[in-house]
Image (cartoon, rainbow, N blue to C red):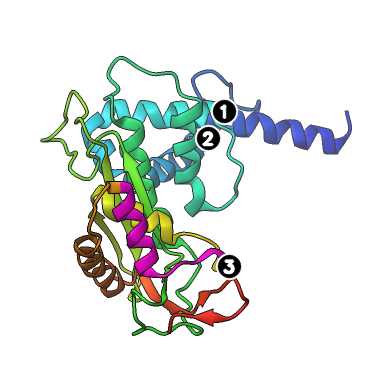
Amino acid sequence: MSEREKLQRLQFEFAAHIRDPDNAPAPAGIEDRRMKIYRELFYNNLRDLLGRSFPVLKRILGEDAWSAMVRDWLRHHRAQTPLFLELPQEFLAYLQHERSAAAGDPPFMLELAHYEWVELALGIDEREIDDGALDPAGDLLKGCPVLSPLASSLAYTWPVHRISPDYQPAEPPAEPTRLLVYRDRRDEVGFIEINMVTARLLELLDVPPDARRSGRDCLLQIAAELGRPGPEAVISAGLEILSGLRERDVIIGVAPCPDPTGRETGQ
C-alpha cells in the first residue's frame, strides 16, 4: 500500500469514527482522549447549528430524541455541499427521503421542518430585489404586477405556523394552510397566512415576462373561476390585495404588459 493510500485509508477511518463512534472504531494509534475532542466538536457544532435552524421541531421532540435524530443523520446521510449554512437543507433532505419513521415522530414533522427551513433559506438567499426596469408606483390593474424573486406561496396540510410545544394537533384541518413567505427590501423575512384567492392571484402573477398579464386580467380570470356573474367586487377586493402585497415588497413594481402585436401596453 502506497503512502497516499495509507493516508486516504486513515482519513476514511477517522471520518467514519467521527460520524458514528459507536459502530466505527477509531484509527489505530490515536489516543482516545484526542479523538474525543474531535468527536465532541464535530457533533456539538452540527447539533447546535441544526437546533438553531429547526428550533420548534427540536423543542417538540425533546433533547434526547433530537440528539438521536442528529446522530442518525450523521450516520446515514452523505451531504452534497461543503457549505456550513447549506447543511440544514441536507438535514431536511434526510428527513424527507432517508429517515425511517419512529414511533414518537409527530405527524406534522416533515412539514414543520420544511416551514422552518424556508425562513432560513430565504434569509441567506444571495439574490436581491431588482426593480430598475419597473414602475414602483404603477397602476396595478392596468399594468402587469411583478413578483419579487424573494417571495413564494406555500401550501401545507398542517397549520405549521401555529405549531409549538403547546399546540400539537393530532389531525390536520379540513382546509390546507396557505402561507406567503417573503423577504423585503430591509432583508426582513415575513410570513402571512393567505386565502385561496390570494394564492391563486400569486400563481397567475408568477409567470415569465413574456406571459405577464395585467392585474385586471388576472382578477377577471379569478372571478370567472369563482363563478361570479359581476366581477367588479372581485376586482375591487383584488386591488386591495395587490396594494398590500406591494407594501410588503412581494410585488416590487409594475411592468408594461406584453401585447400580441409586439407592442407594450399597461402603463
Q: Nearer the viewer, mark 3 or mark 1?
A: 3
Residue 77, horizontal then vertical, whole percent: 54, 31
Which region is colored magenta? 210-225
Please give the name of the residue rendered at 26% of the width and 31% of the height, measured from the top-left corner.
Answer: 63
Please give the name of the residue rendered at 49% of the width and 81% of the height, measured from the top-left corner.
Answer: 265
Residue 57, quarter of picture: top left
- SS at badge 2: helix
- Residue under label 3: 210
- SS at badge 1: helix
Q: Mark 3 is on which residue type? A: Asp
Mark 3 Cα shell of 10 Å, populated few (<14), some (14-19), many (≥20): few
Residue 11, horizontal then vertical, whole percent: 69, 36
Quarter holding the N terminus is top right
Q: Of label 1 and label 2, which has the lower sequence position?
A: 1
Residue 244, horizontal then vertical, whole percent: 24, 69
- Residue under label 1: 17
In three-dimensional space, the C-alpha distance between marks 2 and 3, rounded to whole angstroms, equals 59 Å
How many numbered discs? 3
Mark 1 Cα shell of 10 Å, populated few (<14), some (14-19), many (≥20): many
- SS at badge 3: helix
Q: Of label 3 and label 1, which has the lower sequence position?
A: 1
Please give the name of the residue rendered at 50% of the width and 60% of the height, measured from the top-left corner.
Answer: 207
Q: Which mark is residue 35?
A: 2
In three-dimensional space, the C-alpha distance between marks 3 and 1, rounded to whole angstroms, equals 54 Å
Q: Of label 2 and label 3, which has the lower sequence position?
A: 2
Q: Nearer the viewer, mark 1 or mark 2?
A: 1
Contact between marks 1 and 2 (CB within 8 A): the answer is yes
Q: Is residue 43 above or below residue 227?
A: above
User: 229 or 3, which lies in front?
Assistant: 229
One can see residue 32 in this view: no
Q: Mark 1 is on which residue type? A: His
Residue 56, horizontal then vertical, whole percent: 24, 41
